[in-house]
Image (cartoon, rainbow, N blue to C red):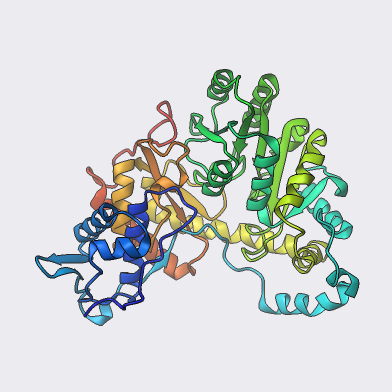
């Protein structure tokens, strides 16, 4: 039997992983999910390449990787076929550990009640005219109050409402620099920031991480070396770094702020995990407000579907930020902004944040029980953790895990330097239900045992910097 005539794999977009890796993941997902059944013949290499607009060599490499995993087999003169998965009761359960989202904590009745109240909270005039591109004043007041609770003392007039934190990053990078500027980031960092920097025409330069966060001495050296760049932007996630899961100490925050002030660098602070931040630390925006673009949002603290973010620009750059915001969107939906504002004011947002903090402790306890021997450290909170390993090992683990129904973030997606051999795997633990998460992590542990050349208790080289410790 041949795969359905109209079928083609859904290759992940918006990530920097090699194309063949994304094709392997897409094919493995369709095999594990039953879209491609045992015995189905895959399209010929040239046929699939033509459908997807990619090279034949990319398809050949992906098919070979799938064959090494035992997911497909080639028959000379006939083609490539999906391998027999065994009896139906042994079908592989697909579990997604690739998307960094929190578990649902908004009760259905809370959402239903809030939606029912929306018509009375918005006037007809607001719905039949273009809203203020910067956000309605009452919405900015509510979000400013939320940011003050996160340690950022921003007045409502200084808050720009965006379509989520990703949009806020895009505005910040575009407004802060001109094409040809440089973004200095950790060796691995948030894939969305890499994409936003690329779209702004910026070069990304990795800065060594010593295990406690970006190394201030390495940052100082990098800023000296890039002194002639049109702009130098230091991108940081000081709380629950994505993907490392580390949180900068207050001393490290002060040291980095001092380096940026001395070298005249701009900071873009991505603080989407602020609800998990310890009271012993402050945002960088509170230390160097004159050069920090502060980004926050509600997808990680309330729900992924709440596409509302906030951007606070330095005073001297506010007009520039407003201009870029208006160029990239007419306005955020007043319905979505009203929903967020309502939950901030009635305490729902704070309640959900508290529930997420408690949930993250439970999920990280499960993760530590299964995989602590493979981690540098267990994060203090949040819904992701990092497994450092050499790049070849990370790619092999990624592929074998896909064959076992485990969807992971492609190893190259987080790399500031796509050619780096220092790698690892980000594992996201917020989406699956708890029992399914336990099964997934035990399955991943078995995969790691197969890949590790000396067993699961061997030291794993850190992927952060040559000076970083090994476990």
Q: Nearer the viewer, residue 453 or 190?
A: 190
Q: Residue at x 66, y 58 (%)?
A: 301
**In this view, 374 is above or below 91:** above
- Residue 265 placement (x, y as % from top left): 66, 26
Q: Nearer the viewer, residue 308 or 281?
A: 308
**In this view, 124 is above or below 233:** below
Q: Residue at x 42, y 26 (%)?
A: 467
Quarter of the rendering containing residue 155: top right
Image quadrant containing the C terminus: top left
**In this view, 248 is above or below 117:** above
Q: Judge from the rendering whether residue 102 lies leftward or rightward of residue 345; answer left or right.
A: left
- Residue 108 placement (x, y as % from top left): 67, 78
Image quadrant containing the N terminus: bottom left
Quarter of the rendering containing residue 107: bottom right
- Residue 286 placement (x, y as % from top left): 76, 36
Q: Is residue 404 visible?
A: no
């Amino acid at each position: 039997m041949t795969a359905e005539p109209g079928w083609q794999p859904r290759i992940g977009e918006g990530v920097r992983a090699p194309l063949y890796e994304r094709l392997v993941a897409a094919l493995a997902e369709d095999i594990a999910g039953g879209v491609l059944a045992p015995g189905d013949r895959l399209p010929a290499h040239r046929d699939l390449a033509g459908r997807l607009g990619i090279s034949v060599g990319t398809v050949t490499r992906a098919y070979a990787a799938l064959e090494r995993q035992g997911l497909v087999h080639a028959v000379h003169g006939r083609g490539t076929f999906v391998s027999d998965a065994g009896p139906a009761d042994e079908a592989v359960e697909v579990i997604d550990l690739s998307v960094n989202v929190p578990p649902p904590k908004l009760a259905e009745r809370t959402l239903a009640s809030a939606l029912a109240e929306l018509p009375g909270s918005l006037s007809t005039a607001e719905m039949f005219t273009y809203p203020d591109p910067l956000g309605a004043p009452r919405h900015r007041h509510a979000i400013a109050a939320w940011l003050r609770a996160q340690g950022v003392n921003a007045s409502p007039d200084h808050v720009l409402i965006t379509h989520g934190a990703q949009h806020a990053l895009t505005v910040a990078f575009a407004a802060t620099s001109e094409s040809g500027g440089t973004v200095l980031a950790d060796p691995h960092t948030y894939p969305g920031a890499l994409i936003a920097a690329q779209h702004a025409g910026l070069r990304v330069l990795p800065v060594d991480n010593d295990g406690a966060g970006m190394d201030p001495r390495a940052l100082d050296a990098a800023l000296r070396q890039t002194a002639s760049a049109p702009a130098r932007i230091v991108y940081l996630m000081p709380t629950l770094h994505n993907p490392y899961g580390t949180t900068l100490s207050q001393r490290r925050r002060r040291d980095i702020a001092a380096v940026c002030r001395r070298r005249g660098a701009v900071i873009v602070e991505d603080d989407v995990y602020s609800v998990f931040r310890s009271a012993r630390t402050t945002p960088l925006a509170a230390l160097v407000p004159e050069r920090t673009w502060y980004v926050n949002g509600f997808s990680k603290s309330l729900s992924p579907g709440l596409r509302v973010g906030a951007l606070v620009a330095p005073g001297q750059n506010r007009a520039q930020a407003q201009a870029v915001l208006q160029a990239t969107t007419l306005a955020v939906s007043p319905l979505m902004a009203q929903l967020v504002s309502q939950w901030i004011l009635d305490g729902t947002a704070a309640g959900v944040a508290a529930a997420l903090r408690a949930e993250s402790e439970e999920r990280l306890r499960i993760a530590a029980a299964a995989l602590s021997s493979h981690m540098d450290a267990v994060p203090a909170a949040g819904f992701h953790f990092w497994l450092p390993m050499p790049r070849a090992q990370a790619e092999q683990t990624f592929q074998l895990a896909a064959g076992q129904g485990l969807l992971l973030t492609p190893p190259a997606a987080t790399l500031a330097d796509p050619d780096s051999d220092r790698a690892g795997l980000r594992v996201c633990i917020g989406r699956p239900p708890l029992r399914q998460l336990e099964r997934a992590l035990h399955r991943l542990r078995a995969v790691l045992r197969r890949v590790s050349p000396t067993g699961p208790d061997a030291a794993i080289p850190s992927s952060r910097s040559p000076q970083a410790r090994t476990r």
